[in-house]
Amino acid sequence: MNSDKPVANETKNTQSLHDHALDSLLPLLACPECRGDLARQGGGLTCQSCSRSYEVADGIPLLAQAGSSELWGVESDSQTSTAYQETFLDATIGERYQQRYERRWSKRFTTRREIGRIEQLLMSQPRCHRLLDIPCGGGRVSGPLVNATDLLLQADISLSQVLTARQTMGSPGSFAWLTASAFLIPLKEGVVDGILCNRLAHHLAGVEQERLIGELLRVSKRFVIMSYYDHDSFKSRGRRLRGKKPGYTLRRSDLAAMARRHGASVAMDLPLWVEGSRLRYALLLKNLD
């Protein structure tokens, strides 16, 4: 008769840990619609300002809103990431994405290099109280963030990815999770010390890139680490010479200009491999004066 007790106790303990993670996150949250305060109501969350309700699934607030510039009232430049976002709403995407990077040796090698660049930029900054990883994916490059902060927030538009990240990272003691769009980050202004935004900007067109950088710098108090595709990389130039589109690239001067418009500057800008690499990692520092 007692055989079910350990299972029941484990379930109860897990739920308690998830509730604790949500409680630590709640004071930081803001309604993605109006940026009002969120409060618990029943099994979900409700905005105290606009009364919009949000579900909580397995301790994870579901605050993501898929879409593009129509969400923030700006005219689209005809190219959007909406279709890209929709691919990540598939319930199995988290596991499949993780497996792709684990099975191929070239992907594993690239992951180690990405982590090295992220660590290099993180080490240039003082230890953080809170860090945000968005989009976190399945936690593929989240490792360096754990030792750099007291609380790591992991967010992704895909619940599947967030669940995979939670499984990857383990104990919720120093973690909190939520679903979120990087265009409408459901956090209050300046509530995290820093943000990692890995492998998102190169999926976005110009209007979306500007919005992304603005949102990251709104939520971060000190810095943002972000990757992007360099417009002047060897691969980008080669594609243009062959009459092909280079993808959603950024000129370094344009990145610097966007950062300035949102109260920051580019402090460091490193290639993933060598100068001329397409993928680069930039450290944006907020202007604190």
Image (cartoon, rainbow, N blue to C red):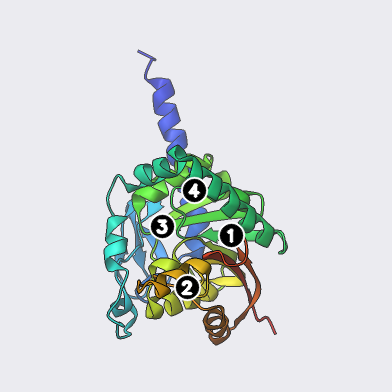
Q: Which residue is mark 3?
A: 156
Callouts 4 and 1 close, C-beta under 8 Å = no
Q: Which residue is mark 2?
A: 237
Q: Which residue is mark 1?
A: 272
Count neighbours of disc 3 (C-alpha within 10 A) and say few if under 14, some if 14 to 19, many if 20 or more.
many
Q: CA distance from mark 4 to mark 1?
A: 19 Å
Q: Amino acid at mark 4?
A: Gly
**Label annotation for residue 139:** 4
Sequence-wise, the earlier of marks 4 and 2 is: 4
Q: CA distance from mark 3 to mark 1?
A: 23 Å
Sequence-wise, the earlier of marks 4 and 1 is: 4
Q: Amino acid at mark 3?
A: Asp
Q: CA distance from mark 4 to mark 3?
A: 10 Å
Q: CA distance from mark 4 to mark 2?
A: 32 Å
Which quarter of the figure has residue 179?
bottom left
Q: In this orientation, does residue 243 appear?
A: yes
Image quadrant occupied by the N terminus: top left
